[in-house]
Each structure stands twice: as structure tokens, then as C-alpha cells.
Image: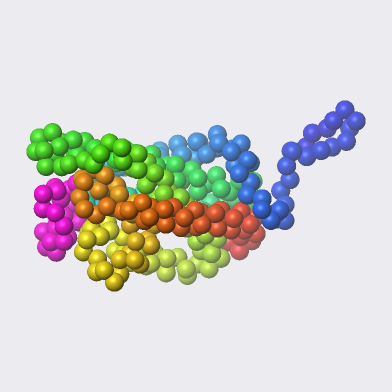
Amino acid sequence: MQKRRSDSKPWWNWEINSKQRFFSLGLRETFYNKGLILRLVRRDLLASYYQTLIGPFWIFLQPLLTTLVYIVIFDKFAKIRPDDKIPAILFYLPGSIIWTFFNDCFTGTMYTFIANAHIFSKVYFPRLVVPLSNTITQSIRLSIQCLLFLIIYLYYYLRYHNVDPAAVSVLFLLPYTVLLTAGFALGSGLITSVFVAKYRDLETFIQFFLRLFMFATPVVYSSNIVPEEYKMLFWLNPLTPVIETFRSTLLNNDGWATVNHLIIATMEVAVIFVVGLFLFKRREVKVMDTI
């Protein structure tokens, strides 16, 4: 965009250049495109359920079907649920919701360059807009799924009185755990997006690693069954304190993550997010030459 002053000398509002300042992250430019982010969020929400039989009801049905599979395999057959007093659906549903949120945020961010190459090659806008819109889209879905969990939770609480929520003072941890999950997924997704765009065979390896990573995360089990010699490594997973805190806050079981666990997870997520943001901004222009 070029404008002219009264003395007819041109000056530039911004310039597209492959050479960037070392510490330039372009966050101000991304903020100026908040309207585009909202339009992409709307597009993703509408496109996800366009020409489907039940439309947006898939938001509710997906975690319920996944939880049903977990109940049949891990509760009825494997019998690894730690507390029989807690309804099975309330134990498995939080892990399913959090993991789906992380997986969708991470996967959507990882394919930023591959899925949008046809757009990036034609028009310029801050590339960070795309992964941010994906994260916001998944956050909206997460909010709706959390509403589903709350309805089921209130049903058991009011009718059977077999769930015991923790103190109200710790309920503020729930939004914080969601923020940690989003930061972890976005940061790690930004890192992998740069390498997957250049080395396509990494996609297969990462998808395989994600499957293994799910079983290293307490999605279908509690931290109580992890042997002591592996617990230090187990708690280094940023999603472990997230799921255990989410579960313990509402069910008040004995799988509490300590404050130290949450602090370590916060530090890990902060480092991953900053590294991912820095690497993404440094390579967002040059990576298009390899697609």
C-alpha cells in the first residue's frame, strides 16, 4: 500500500520482504487482521458441518461416542478406572474432550502451509492468522462440549449425589488448564508446520507419535496407576496436570496435580509457544518456496 504526502514523496505503510528483523514477530500486524480471523473462524465452523446429516450435533456426538468406546474397552474389559464411585462417563469424558481439543488444534496448525498453499501463493496476510483462527474455532467447540459435560455432571450431582466437586476457590483453574492446552497445541503445531511443509514424510511419523502420546497422557486412566519410577517423566507431559486438574476439580478424586506440576507445565508451554512463534515467523515467507 502506497500513499503520497503533500510533497509528492511516497512512503509505505508496510512492505513484504523475505528479510525480517531478528526479533520481529508481527503481532501488531496480526492484531490488525482480527476481522479476517473472525471470518476464518466462521468459515471453519460452517464448512465443518456443511452437507452433513446431523450438522453441528456432531460436536456433541463425537465426544460421547469416543467416551462410549473408552467405557467399553477400558472400564468393562481392562477395568482401570480407579474409583468405582465416580460414574464412568464423568471420568472418561473430560480426558476425551481435552485430548480432542489438543489434537484438533495441533493437527490444524501443523497443516497450515500445506492446506493453505493455494491462498498463501496468491495474497499476502499474516500467516499467523490461520493457526490462530483454527485455535479459536476449536476453543468454541470445546466450550460447547464442556457445556455437554456440565449437563451430564449436574444430572449425576442432583439425582444420585455421587459426585463431589472440589472447593469453589479452585474452579478458576479450569480456564487456566484450557489456556495451557491451547498454548501447548499452538506452539508445538507452529514448530511442526515449518518442518512438515519441507519434509512430507514427517507427517506419517508425527501422526504415529500422536497415537503414542495419547497413551502417555492420562486420557483413559488416572495417575494413580503409574509406577513411582515413571511418575517424574509422566508429570513432565504438559497435558498430564491439565487433565488431572480438570478431572479432580470437578470429581474431587485423589489424582490432584500439585502447584509445582502446574508451574512446570506452564514453563514448558511458554518455552514451546515462544519457540514455535519465533520459528514460524522466521520461516513463514521462505517456506512457501518448498511447497
Position of the N terminus, as image quadrant, is top right
Residue 279, percent across and down? 59, 58
Task: Using the rendered image of the protein, determine whether residue 146 is visible from the camera's viewpoint.
Answer: yes
Q: On the picture, is 264 further left or further right than 60? A: right
Query: What residue do we see at 50% from left, 57% from top?
Result: 272
Q: Residue furthest top?
A: 6
Rendering coords of residue 274 (x, y %): 55, 54
Residue 255 on the magenta span: no
Say above or below: 134 vs 35: below
Does residue 95 lie above or below 159 as drawn? below
Residue visible at 12% across and 61% down?
Answer: 79
Q: Where residue 13 sits: x, y (%)?
A: 74, 38
**Quick check: 176 above or below 70?**
above
Residue 219 lies in what quarter of the image?
bottom left
Image colouring = rainbow
Residue 61: x and y, percent? 24, 44
Q: Residue furthest left?
A: 160
Verify whether residue 78 appears in magenta: yes
Residue at image x 61%, y 36%? 32
Name the image quarter holding the C terminus: bottom right
Residue bounds of the magenta highlight: 67-90
User: Which residue is nearer to you in this view: 168 or 203?
Assistant: 168
Residue 214 in view here: no
Identified at 47% across, 55% down, the residue is 267
Left or right position of 254 against 202: left
